[in-house]
Amino acid sequence: MHELSAPLTAALIGFMDFEDRAKLNAALGTALQGNMTASGSVAVEHICKARVLLHHSERNAESFTSITKAVARAITALQSRSL
């Protein structure tokens, strides 16, 4: 799953540095598509949570932190599945 976590990590960095929501949304979509067969997995749950937060949150520090945490948890779940 590193092929999914590496682009997601890069998009997360772009979001943290420049609040690039479009790139992060695209990376989350790609990660979700790559995990469609793993419904109910922890990674899918975190990816979906991150997408909901990204689309429905206000642009403030609290939502920024929530989005960042959800994406980081998704990356961790993707990487732990590949071990």
Image (tube, helix red, strand yellow):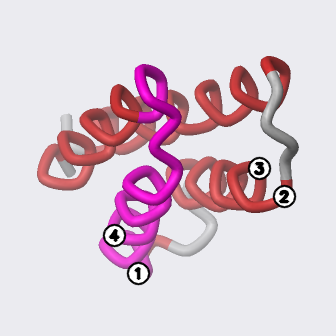
Q: How far apart are marks 1 and 3 (CA)?
A: 23 Å
Can you say whether 16 is above or below 75 in the image?
A: above
> What amino acid type should be assigned to the residue bearing mark 1?
Thr
Q: How far apart are marks 3 and 2 (CA)?
A: 5 Å
- Residue at x 41% of width, y 30% of height: 76
Determine crowd level at label 1: few under 14, some 14-19, many 20+ residues with C-alpha closer than 10 A. Answer: few
Q: How far apart are marks 4 and 1 (CA)?
A: 13 Å
Circle 3/circle 2 CB separation < 8 Å:
yes
* Residue 41 spot, x, y in % from top left: 55, 59
Q: Toward the viewer: 33 or 28?
A: 28
Q: How far apart are marks 3 and 4 (CA)?
A: 17 Å
SS for callout 1: helix
* Residue 31 spot, x, y in % from top left: 36, 62
> Mark 3 sits on what residue?
53
Circle 2/circle 4 CB separation < 8 Å:
no
Circle 1/circle 3 CB separation < 8 Å:
no
Which disc, if any, is residue 37? Answer: 1
> Mark 4 sits on what residue?
30
- Residue at x 31% of width, y 72% of height: 34
Q: How far apart are marks 2 and 4 (CA)?
A: 19 Å
SS for callout 2: helix
Report the magenta residues as a range: 15-36
Can you say whether 15 is above or below 49 in the image?
A: above
* Residue 13 spot, x, y in % from top left: 35, 26
SS for callout 3: helix
Q: Which of marks 1 and 3 is in front?
A: 3
Which disc, if any, is residue 7? Answer: none
Name the N-terminal-most of marks 3 and 4: 4
Name the N-terminal-most of marks 4 and 1: 4
> Mark 2 sits on what residue?
56
> What amino acid type should be assigned to the residue bearing mark 2?
His
Q: Toward the viewer: 46 or 83?
A: 46
